[in-house]
Image (tube, rainbow, N blue to C red):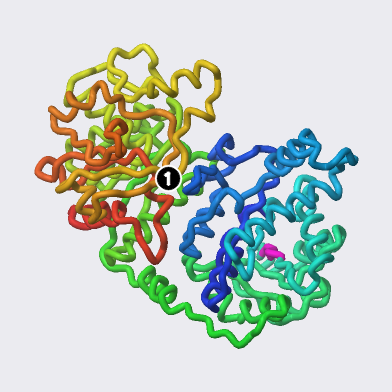
C-alpha cells in the first residue's frame, strides 16, 4: 500500500545502522517515467525535495537527510525515466559495442550500477535502497529484478525488508494477516524472499499473528517486527531498536553484531517532542492542500517538520493548521481568522491559483503585526503585497501571472528570458545551493549569526532589481543578497515596525534537521511564542 511508511522505515533502519557506528547512505527508486520529480503534480506526488546539487527528488530523500543528518546527491535518486534515458544514451554512443540492448538484463544492470556508484561515492558500509510503489505493480518489476540479481551476485551482502500493512477493520475487531501473506507470495513470484517483515498497523502485532505471518510468509517469527502507529515518526527508530531490528539485519548481512546502539541525542529529541510546553498556533496558508475530499499536508512536509524541530528547541508545542488560500479568495473564509494564530507561514508554489488569497493574508498579518515567514513564492508575494499597499503600485505583480504589468516587481532575469522564448524552461530554474551575503543588524543576520550563508533554491522568477531601491525607500529591507548584489535572497521589515516579518527566496526548510533546527524557523517560532 502506498503511504504505508516505507520511507520512514528505510530512514529509521539507516539511523539504527548509523547509531551503531556504521557509515550509511540511502537511495530512493521512483518507478515513474519522469526523469525527476520536478514536473510532478505536488497534490498527487507530494513535496519536491531539492538537493544541494539541484536535483529535484521525492520527499523521501528529505527523510533520509533529516534522519541521517547528511547531504545527499543526485546519484542517490533514480526514476524509471532516468534509468532508461541513460541506457538509451549509452546505446546511441555505441557503449554496448553493437550488442542487442534489452530490458532484461540491461535495465536492471544499470540500476545496480547506480546503486553501487552511490555506495562507493558515500564510502558506505551499508546502503539502504527503497523501491517505490507497491509489490505486484508492473512498473517496478525492473527494480525488483535488479534486487534479485544483486542477491544472486552477493548472497551474503543483501537483505530484503518488506513493509506490509495489517488492517484492523473496526467492525470486525481482529487484525488481518491475509494481505501480508499475499504480498509475500507476490514478492516470491519475482524471485525475492523477504528476510524481515515490518508489520505496519494501527495497534501492536500480537504473538498469534506474528506466528501466522512467520508460518505463511516463510520468515522467522523474531524477524517479524511490529510497527504500530506512533505519535511521531521520530519514535520509529526507537521502536525498531526495542525489537532489535538493527542486530537482526546485521546478522542477515553477516556483519559483526557486537555494536552498541547510540541513540542518546535521538531519545532527547523524542522526549522534547512529547514534553509540550506552551502551545503555539501556526497557520500554514498554502495552495496545494486539497486532494479530492482530503487534505494533503505532504506537499509541504519539509516546512511542517522544520517548524516542529524549532518548536522542540524553543520548548513549545506546535499546533499547525492548514488553510487553503482559495478560501480567502472565494470569501469562504475571512482573513481575520488569522488573528487567532501566533504566526503565519506562506510556503512555496507556482502559478496563479489562490494567489490573491495569499496576498490578502500577507496584508492582514503585516498590518496586524502577526509573525510571518514567507518561503520562495511566499517571499515574492510579500514583495508584491508591499509594492501594492505600501508603495501604492496597485498593478504590481509577477510576470508569471501578469506579463503586462507596468510594475513587474517579480520578473525573469534578462539571461533567463532567452531560454523561455526557446521553451527551454529547465534552464530558467535556479536549483540547488547558492551563497548569499547578509546585512549586519538585520533579523536574518541575528538569526543565522553569520555574514554568509548557503541555501537551496527552486524557482524561476526573481525580485526585479529595477524596483529594489524604491521599495527599500519605503521601508522594505533586502537583508540577503547574492554575492554580486543582483539577486535578492531575503526580504524583511525592521523590528521597530513589525515583530517578525521575513521572506526568503530560497527554501530553508530543506536544510532543517531534527537535531539541528534551522535558525530562521527558530527565530520565527520564538517570535510566535511571544505573541499573545
Q: Position of residue 141 (x, y in %)?
A: 80, 50
Q: Is residue 472 magenta?
A: no
Residue that mark 1 sits on: 433
- In front: 502, or 285? 502
> Residue 137 in the image: x percent, y percent?
77, 49
> In the displayed structure, would residue 522 be above or below residue 200?
above
- Are there few (<14), some (14-19), or many (20+) residues within 10 Å of tag 1? some
Q: Specify the quadrant of the image occupied by residue 337.
A: top left
- Judge from the rendering whether residue 418 lies leftward or rightward of residue 38; answer left or right: left
Is residue 469 among what the camera can see?
yes
**Does residue 365 appear to the left or right of 204 in the view shown?**
left
In the figure, 133 relative to 413: above or below?
Answer: below
In the image, the segment drawn in magenta is 162-167
Q: Residue at x 29, y 13 (%)?
A: 406
Residue at position x 37%, y 41% in the image:
506
Which residue corresponds to the image point at 78% horizontal and 76% vertical from the top-left? Answer: 219
SS at mark 1 in the image: strand
Amino acid at each position: 500500500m502506498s503511504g504505508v511508511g516505507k520511507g520512514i522505515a528505510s530512514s529509521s533502519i539507516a539511523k539504527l545502522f548509523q547509531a551503531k557506528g556504521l557509515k550509511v547512505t540511502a537511495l530512493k527508486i521512483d518507478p515513474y517515467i519522469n526523469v525527476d520529480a520536478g514536473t510532478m503534480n505536488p497534490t498527487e506526488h507530494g513535496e519536491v525535495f531539492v538537493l544541494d546539487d539541484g536535483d529535484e527528488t521525492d520527499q523521501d530523500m528529505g527523510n533520509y537527510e533529516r534522519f541521517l543528518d547528511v547531504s545527499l546527491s543526485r546519484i542517490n535518486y533514480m526514476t524509471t525515466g532516468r534509468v532508461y534515458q541513460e541506457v538509451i544514451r549509452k546505446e546511441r554512443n555505441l557503449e554496448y559495442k553493437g550488442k542487442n540492448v534489452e530490458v532484461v538484463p540491461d535495465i536492471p544492470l544499470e540500476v545496480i550500477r547506480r546503486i553501487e556508484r552511490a555506495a562507493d561515492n558515500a564510502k558506505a558500509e551499508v546502503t539502504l535502497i527503497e523501491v517505490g510503489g507497491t509489490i505486484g505493480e508492473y512498473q517496478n518489476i525492473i527494480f525488483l529484478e535488479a534486487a534479485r540479481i544483486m542477491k544472486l551476485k552477493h548472497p551474503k551482502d543483501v537483505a530484503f525488508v518488506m513493509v506490509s500493512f495489517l488492517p484492523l477493520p473496526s467492525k470486525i475487531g481482529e487484525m488481518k494477516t491475509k494481505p501480508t501473506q499475499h504480498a509475500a507470495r507476490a514478492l516470491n513470484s519475482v524471485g525475492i524472499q523477504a528476510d524481515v517483515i515490518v508489520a505496519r498497523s494501527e495497534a501492536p502485532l500480537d504473538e498469534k499473528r506474528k506466528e501466522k505471518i512467520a508460518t505463511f510468509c516463510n520468515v522467522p517469527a523474531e524477524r517479524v517486527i511490529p510497527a504500530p502507529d506512533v505519535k511521531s515518526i521520530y519514535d520509529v527508530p526507537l521502536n525498531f531498536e526495542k525489537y532489535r531490528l538493527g542486530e537482526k539485519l546485521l546478522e542477515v548481512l553477516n556483519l559483526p553484531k557486537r555494536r552498541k546502539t547510540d541513540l542518546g541525542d535521538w531519545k532527547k529529541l523524542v522526549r522534547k517532542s512529547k514534553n509540550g510546553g506552551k502551545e503555539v498556533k501556526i497557520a500554514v496558508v498554502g495552495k496545494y492542500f486539497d486532494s479530492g475530499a482530503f487534505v494533503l499536508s505532504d506537499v509541504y512536509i519539509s516546512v511542517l517538520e522544520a517548524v516542529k524541530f524549532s518548536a522542540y528547541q524553543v520548548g513549545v508545542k506546535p499546533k499547525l493548521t492548514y488553510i487553503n488560500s482559495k478560501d480567502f479568495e472565494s470569501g469562504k473564509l475571512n482573513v481575520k481568522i488569522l488573528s487567532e494564530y501566533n504566526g503565519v507561514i506562506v510556503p512555496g508554489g507556482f502559478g496563479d491559483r489562490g494567489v490573491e488569497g495569499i496576498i490578502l493574508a500577507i496584508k492582514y498579518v503585516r498590518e496586524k503585526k502577526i509573525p510571518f515567514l514567507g518561503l520562495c513564492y511566499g517571499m515574492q508575494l510579500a514583495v508584491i503585497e508591499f509594492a501594492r499597499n505600501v508603495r501604492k503600485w496597485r498593478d504590481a505583480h509577477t510576470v508569471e501571472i501578469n506579463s503586462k504589468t507596468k510594475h513587474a516587481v517579480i520578473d525573469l532575469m534578462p539571461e533567463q528570458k532567452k531560454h523561455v522564448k526557446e521553451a527551454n524552461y529547465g534552464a530558467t530554474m535556479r536549483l540547488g545551493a547558492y551563497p548569499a551575503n547578509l546585512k549586519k543588524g538585520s533579523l536574518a543576520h541575528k538569526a543565522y549569526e553569520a555574514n554568509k550563508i548557503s541555501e537551496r533554491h527552486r524557482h524561476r522568477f526573481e525580485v526585479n532589481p529595477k524596483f529594489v531601491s524604491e521599495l527599500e525607500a519605503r521601508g522594505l529591507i533586502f537583508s540577503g543578497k547574492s554575492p554580486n548584489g543582483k539577486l535578492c535572497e531575503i526580504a524583511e521589515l525592521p523590528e521597530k515596525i513589525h515583530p517578525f516579518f521575513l521572506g526568503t527566496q530560497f527554501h530553508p526548510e530543506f536544510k532543517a534537521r531534527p537535531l539541528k533546527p534551522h535558525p530562521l524557523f527558530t527565530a520565527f517560532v520564538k517570535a510566535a511564542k511571544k505573541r499573545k
